[in-house]
Image (cartoon, grey):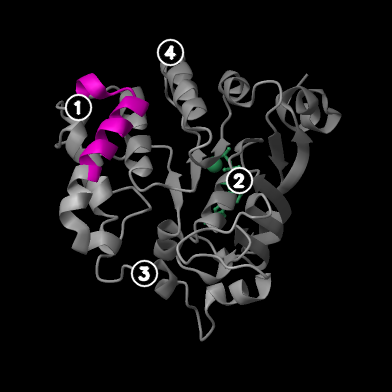
Amino acid sequence: MIGLSVLNDPLNPNPFDEALKGDELALSGVADMGHVVEPGTIDTSHGTILYLEDVTVSFDGFRALNKLSLTIDAGELRCVIGPNGAGKTTMMDVITGKTATDSGKVFLGQTLDLTRMNEPAIARVGIGRKFQKPTVFEQHPVWENLELAMKADKGWFATLRARLDRDAQAKIEETLEVIRLESDARRLAGELSHGQKQRLEIGMLLMQKPQLLLLDEPAAGMTDDETMELATLLNRLRGSCSMMVVEHDMEFVAALAGETGRVTVMAEGSVLAHGTLDDVKRDEAVIESYLGR
Ligand SMILES: Nc1ncnc2c1ncn2[C@@H]1O[C@H](COP(=O)(O)OP(=O)(O)OP(=O)(O)O)[C@@H](O)[C@H]1O
Ligand SMILES: [Mg+2]
């Protein structure tokens, strides 16, 4: 079983085919936007990659998300913190199409209504998700793990195979460098440490060239050194994709947010506070519900 949420169906290479729900094309709004958006790209012309407005999700009457509103800028690395049960994972489930909303808006860029798309289609338009537990092909070398992750994305370009293979090689090498596993390329993934496996899984997601990467507690179970190495890796990815990182480890959050990065604090299914890490640390409601005195 592969844990990546971005695997592709080569028989149905066009993500927008699957964006169809009912009779309406999810991209139909494009024509109304006043500018042309190339199919397969995300329209971030207004500076926003992810837009959630008043999103509510109930489980048997319990509101896991309660009118959650949140915007992530294109290129931003946003940290999301908050107590257990705040709805952080549920929010990622909604963005990736795993959980349906009761109400509210969820848009990728200006035009892609994620509530109208299913999970594989959402993965194909460029949202990669990393779950807490690393899921790699233990019996395969690191290199092959990256290659397999890329093959899942070949559908669009199958006819350009020769060229793609050269590009693929370069992409794998580049990714190995980003995840700092160059010298482990030939080792079996199963032999890697927990921290290395986590980095490999991020590398596998990167092979799909995500526009938005969602990471749910990526530092959980890591040593302090591994945690800081992961922070360095994510900081290096800035600019190549937008990221949303849910995490409890405050040192890790500090390493990602720095002095100016924006941090969102969630509680009881909505946003409790929002600002720099210093801002939210000083917020009375945040101290009360999460950080403690
Ligand atoms: N499939 C489900 N069915 C019923 N309740 C659910 C389901 N998924 C989540 N919940 C409930 O929704 C609430 C929010 O859960 P969620 O996992 O999103 O919180 P979280 O912020 O990710 O917490 P943590 O920090 O512990 O990971 C919790 O009370 C949880 O029990
Ligand atoms: Mg969670």
Q: Nearer the viewer, residue 148 or 219?
A: 148
* Distance from the alpha carbon under mark 3 to that under mark 2: 23 Å
Magenta-highlighted residues: 167-184
Q: Is mark 3 within 8 Å of ligand 1?
A: no
Give the amino acid type for the residue marked by disc 1 in the picture: Ala
Residue picked out by circle 4: 225
Give the mark, 3 or 4, whose residue is nearer the N terminus. 3
Q: Residue 245: x and y, percent?
A: 55, 36
Q: Is residue 151 left or right of residue 58?
A: left
Q: Is 280 rendered above or below residue 129?
A: above
Nearer-N-terminus badge (1/4): 1
Secondary structure type for disc 4: helix
Residue drawn at x 17%, y 56% is 161
What secondary structure is found at the residue carrying circle 2?
Answer: loop
- Amino acid type, residue under disc 2 in the picture: Ala
Q: Position of residue 272 (x, y in %)?
A: 77, 41
Q: Could one spot residue 291 in this view of the protein? A: yes
